[in-house]
Amino acid sequence: GDTGPRRPGRAPFAIAALLLMVVLVVAGIFPIQVAAFFAATLVVLTRALHMHEAYRAVEWRAIFLVAAILPVGAAMERTGAAELLAGSVAGIAGDAGPYGVLLALMVLSSVLSQGLDGAPTVVLLGPVVISTASQVGMSPYPLMMGVGLAASAAFMTPFSHKANLLVMGAGGYRSLDYLKVGTPLTIVILGILTFMIPLLMPF
């Protein structure tokens, strides 16, 4: 909704802050969170946005939900639950052929990334991929590529990615909406990856 009077004269400062943030991230000068904070600070300092307006624009539900989910991901990592699950699935799919192994690891990567961030998911599955590739006589490169890409196929829950949380409140979405739309989208993406990755990185 409208958070205050329009200030079109300050629009160039907001655009400049956005462009500066993109440049800082693309050039590798700052990580995205630092660059975004820097850009937000500039927006406030140039009075393109007042501090009380910035507070009202924050999606506090998303912040608290992220804070609540992070310990769950840490618990899965520290207790070894995620790695145990990964080892079990990889062992079962070992006799299903290269496509079966690739698909099984990608499904597991996508499922884990619904609750974990993509990076921890890839880190958890990395050793399992190397071990599985050695046992079945496959190249680890297509398997790792599949796990890495499937970790980004996280559309089934609102907390699978911070972008999902940001649009949840603004769009009035429910968790069920993500599941209904995200499930078929995930299936399509994993199917495409299963056939495309071996073409670029043979088994």
Image (spheres, rainbow, N blue to C red):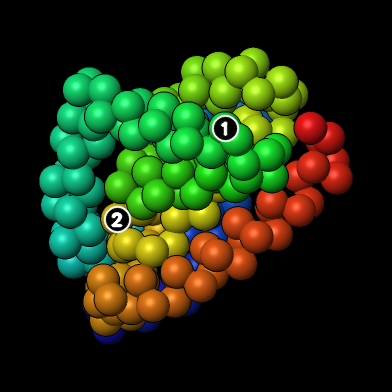
For image coordinates 50% across by 68% down, the residue present is 11
Q: Which mark is residue 94?
A: 1
Find out whether the residues at labels 1 and 2 contact each other: C-beta distance under 8 Å: no
Q: CA distance from mark 1 to mark 2?
A: 31 Å
Q: Residues within 10 Å of mark 1 (few under 14, many from 20)?
A: some
| Left/right of residue 93 with respect to residue 167 in the rendered view | right
Q: Nearer the viewer, residue 83 or 91?
A: 91
Quadrant (top left/top right/bottom left/bottom right) for the C terminus:
top right
| Vertical side of 188 occupied by 6: above or below | below
Relative to 203, residue 162 above or below: below
Q: Which quadrant holds residue 61?
A: bottom left
In the figure, is residue 77 to the left or right of 21?
left
| Whole-percent x, y for residue 149 in the image | 60, 44
Of residues 159 and 96, the one nearer the viewer is 96
Q: Residue at x 38, y 64 (%)?
A: 156
Q: Amino acid at mark 2?
A: Phe
Residue sitting at x 57%, y 32%: 94
Q: Quadrant of the N terminus?
A: bottom left
Location of residue 198 in the rendering, given as x and y in whole percent from the top left corner: 79, 42
Question: Which mark sits nearer the N-terminus, 1 or 2?
Answer: 1
User: Mark number for residue 159?
Assistant: 2
User: Is residue 160 rendered to the left or right of residue 58?
Assistant: right
Q: What amino acid type should be assigned to the residue bearing mark 1?
A: Gly
Count the labels in the image: 2
User: Residue 35: x, y in percent?
Assistant: 46, 38
Instruction: Kindly identify the residue that appears in the image at 29 percent across and 55 percent down.
Output: 159
Place of residue 202 in the rendered image (x, y in percent of width and height, measured from the top left) = 83, 35
Asked if residue 50 shows in the view, the reply is no
Asked whether residue 164 is in view, the answer is: yes
